[in-house]
Image: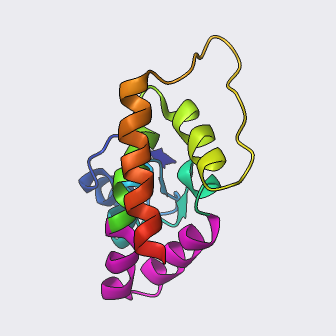
Amino acid sequence: MKEFSGDVRRILEIRELAPDLAVVAGADDLTLEALLMGATGWFAGFPNVFPAESVRLFDLALQGKLEEARALYEPLVAAFRWDSRVEFVQAIKYGMDYVGRYGGPCRPPRGPLVPEHVAQLEQDMKKALESLR
C-alpha cells in the first residue's frame, strides 16, 4: 500500500491493522521517516534526478544507519518536497535536465513551471548538488 498522507504515524497503524501488507513510502520528502517507521519500499519521483543518492539513502535507512542517512537526506529534502506539489512532474523533469539527464518537456495538460517556481527549484537543486560534492 502506498502511504502518501504525509502522516508517518499511519505506517504503524496500517501495519497493525494488516501485518502482512507491505507499506511503501509515497512521498519523497518523507522517505527516511517512512522507512524508519517500517515502510519497505518507496514510490519515488526525485530519484530520477538523484538515482545513486536515492539508492544509498534507501539502503542506509534499511540498515538503520540513521546518522549517515540523515546527512545525505537533509540537503536533498528541499528538492524532494517538489514531489508532493502539483507541479511535481514538471519539477522532476526540470531537475533531470538540470543535472544532465534528459527530462524533457511535459505533455499537456501540464504546462511549464512559472518563473517563481523555476527560481525556487534551482535554489533547491543547487543546495542538493552542493551537498553531494
Q: Is 107 situated above or below 41? A: above
Closer-to-camera residue (122/47): 122
Q: Main secondary structure of the magenta part?
A: helix
Q: Residue at x 34, y 52 (%)?
A: 78
108 left or right of 37? Answer: right
Relative to residue 51, is residue 85 drawn left or right? Answer: left
Q: Is residue 75 visible?
A: yes
Query: Farthest residue toward the top?
Result: 109
Residue 59 lies within the magenta run: yes
88 or 1: which is nearer to us?
A: 88
| Magenta-colored span | 51-74
Relative to 129, does residue 126 appear above or below in the rendering?
above
User: Can residue 4 be seen in the rendering of this structure?
Assistant: no
Residue 14 image position (x, y, % from top left): 37, 52
Is residue 53 placed above or below 13 in the rendered structure?
A: below
The percent position of residue 97, horizontal first and vertical second, equals 65, 45
Instruction: Give the percent coordinates (x, y) of residue 73.
Output: 38, 69
At which x and y percent is residue 4?
Answer: 40, 42
Who is closer to the viewer here, 30 or 51?
A: 51
Q: Quadrant of residue 116?
A: top left
Residue at position x 63%, y 39% in the image: 93
Q: Nearer the viewer, residue 19 or 84?
A: 84
Horizontal side, residue 31 vs residue 8: left or right = right
Taking the spot 55% from the left edge, 72% from the top edge, the residue there is 53
Image coloring type: rainbow
Q: Residue at x 71, y 19 (%)?
A: 107
How many badges with numbers are in the image?
A: 0
Q: Quadrant of residue 127?
A: bottom left
Residue 57 magenta? yes
